Image: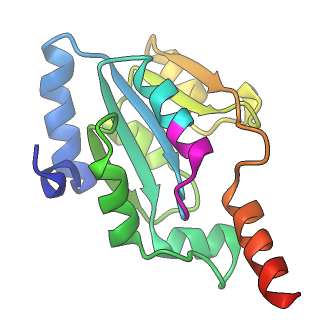
């Protein structure tokens, strides 16, 4: 599939996913900034994809990241981050969202399975109650030790300031 066809606006994607669910496919949803793609992201996305048939990544827009992480982020612009994610074979669809959390997007897309990192307790996972109330499930994926965008950024700063 053409990479650009995997990047969709939320409403168009909701329509596509409705058809896939009717065909018996389990839709997996995860979200994040994915600012500097690293091994932790890759392992996380593979684990998420293994939970169902279709993996959708809700990607925090540049505006959303600034709300969450401050004015110095993101490092990589949203269109580039979306293209990088869409180029991964394990990712079926990517959609951007501007809010500080993905609840509205989760409610629109209606995933069967919601995946987040193990650093989130299930009671703090945005959308968990919604997904479970619809008969779905929530999966927490173990994190890769010392693999984070913040750590990478700090290591770069340390190396160039020495």
User: Relative to 30, is 143 on the left or the right?
Assistant: right
Using the image as rendered, state which of residue 146 and residue 133 is in the foreground.
146
Is residue 39 within the magenta segment?
yes
At 32% across and 37% down in the image, what residue appears? 109
Q: In which quadrant of the rendered image does the N terminus lie?
A: top left
Quadrant of the rendered image containing residue 113: top left
Tell me where residue 70 sits by quadrant: bottom right
x and y percent of residue 144 in the render?
Answer: 71, 37
Q: Position of residue 72 (x, y in %)?
A: 66, 84
Residue at screen point 34% across, 34% down:
90
In the rendered image of this protein, does residue 22 appear above or below residue 65?
Answer: above
Residue beneath the point at 39% across and 27% down: 28
Q: Residue at x 46, y 29 (%)?
A: 46
19 displayed left or right of 32:
left
Q: Nearer the viewer, residue 15 or 71?
A: 71
Q: Which residues are magenta?
A: 36-42
Quarter of the image for the C terminus: give it: bottom right
Residue in front for this viewpoint, 145 or 11: 145
Q: Is residue 19 left or right of residue 45?
A: left
| Residue 66 higher or lower than 88, as above or below | below
């Amino acid at each position: 599939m053409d990479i650009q066809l995997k990047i969709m606006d939320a409403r168009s994607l909701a329509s596509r996913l409705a058809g896939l669910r009717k065909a018996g496919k389990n839709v997996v949803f995860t979200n994040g900034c994915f600012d500097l793609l690293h091994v932790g992201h890759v392992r996380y996305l593979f684990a998420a994809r293994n939970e169902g048939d279709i993996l959708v990544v809700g990607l925090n827009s540049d505006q959303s990241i600034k709300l969450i992480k401050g004015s110095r982020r993101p490092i990589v612009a949203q269109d580039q981050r979306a293209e990088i994610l869409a180029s991964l074979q394990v990712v079926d669809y990517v959609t951007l969202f501007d809010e500080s959390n993905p609840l509205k997007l989760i409610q629109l897309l209606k995933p069967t399975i919601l995946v987040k990192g193990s650093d989130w307790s299930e009671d703090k996972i945005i959308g968990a109650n919604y997904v479970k109330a619809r008969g779905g499930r929530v999966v927490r994926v173990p994190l890769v030790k010392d693999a984070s965008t913040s750590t990478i950024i700090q290591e770069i700063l340390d190396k160039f300031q020495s």
